[in-house]
Amino acid sequence: MKIVTVIGARPQFVKAAVVSREISKYDNIKECIIHTGQHFDKNMSTVFFEEMQIPLPDYNLNINGLSHGAMTGQMLEGIESILFKEKPDWVLVYGDTNSTLAGALAARKNHIKVAHVEAGLRSYNMDMPEEINRILTDLISDVLFCPTDVAIENLEKEGFKNLDYEILKSGDVMKDAMSFYMNKASEPECSIPEQFILCTVHRAENTDNEERMSSIIEALEKISSTLCPVVVPLHPRTEKVLQTRNYDFEASNIHFIAPVGYFEMIWLIKHCNFVMTDSGGLQKEAYFGNKYCITIRTETEWKELVEKNYNFISGYEKNNIINLAGKIHAMPPLSFQDELYGNGNASSIIVNKLSCNI
């Protein structure tokens, strides 16, 4: 049996790593990994793969820095040619990137079975490219591995239960990853305040909206100067936008640091007071690290975190962000004991299912 795994963004490598380790336990399964190159990262060297214990990709398409249409189209063409050569039984895709959609499309159009990890997630914000990718990928997949009960409910509401799909609650592979890598956390090689709030801002719907971005930055400035230092690993997109708007980094109250690797991010999560982010993945990682999270958006695909009061939606208005940060800063810690995302064996469930469905 052969599985072709299609990944392209750094977080997808972390997710795929735990599944690849599980696949390696099966003598009768061969995995072929395609790296689309969607998120070009100079730090993703051979050393990165060795440290993360991730198999090196068999193919690298080096497709990045293009518009959504050009990127997805070139990926579709490149993946398809590899599928013709490899002739897999399954194509395995993760999450909601252009790589996810391209991999699923290439497989489905050539009658190859598709398995989607992190299926059923919905923010119901169609302005997000990720929302479009995840909905379309769900529609053309054969097996939908859902991380949560909410994800399954979303699919049932959309009628998937009445059609020819296999829907399975697998738990979340990010839970597997955090459990595996937690003891590898490493402190960033830069000055970090003893007490700090960890914040990331990178989504295009925030960075590319001048009014929204200004409101977020003003809020972070205020929080960092009056409540607790805010540490921001600076995403290249965010840095470029701020430079274009002549933002004075030297005079800022915010503690900007260079982008960090996965092990350093785990350290920051473990040692911060709480997390603020517009990222989808970091919302869960905050929970896995027993930290409250403020989501700087108007919605989230991880609704169970909001319902259980682990995650709080701030929106983009400056005073709302500031007031919510003050509230979270004063809150007592919770136990974070709810098993919202399984018990860390999602990869085992996924590979076992695929091995039984040849």
Image (cartoon, rainbow, N blue to C red):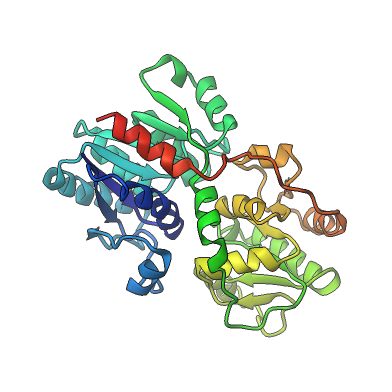
| Rendering coords of residue 47 (x, y %) | 37, 74
Residue 316 seen in this snapshot? no
Question: Which of the image's four quarters has the C terminus?
Answer: top left
Q: Seen in the image, is 187 located left or right of residue 193? A: left
Extreme residue toward the left, this view:
85
Q: Quadrant of the N terminus?
A: top left
172 and 104: which is toward the camera: 172
Image point (71%, 41%), residue name: 306
**Quarter of the image where one finds residue 183:** bottom right
Most extreme residue toward the top is 162
Q: Would you say 116 lies left or right of 197 here?
A: left
Above or below, comparing residue 175 to residue 54 in the picture: above
- In this rendering, would 118 be left or right of 64? right
The answer to whether residue 57 is visible is: yes
Picture coordinates of residue 210, whole percent (x, y) = 62, 61
The total number of labels drawn is 0
Quarter-of-image position of residue 274: bottom right
Q: Is residue 235 above or below residue 100?
A: below
In the image shown, does 239 or 134 lie closer to the viewer?
Answer: 134
Q: Residue at x 47, y 45 (%)?
A: 130
Residue at x 38% of width, y 29% of height:
139
Residue 159, x across and y down, in percent: 47, 18
Where is residue 43? Give x, y as percent.
41, 73
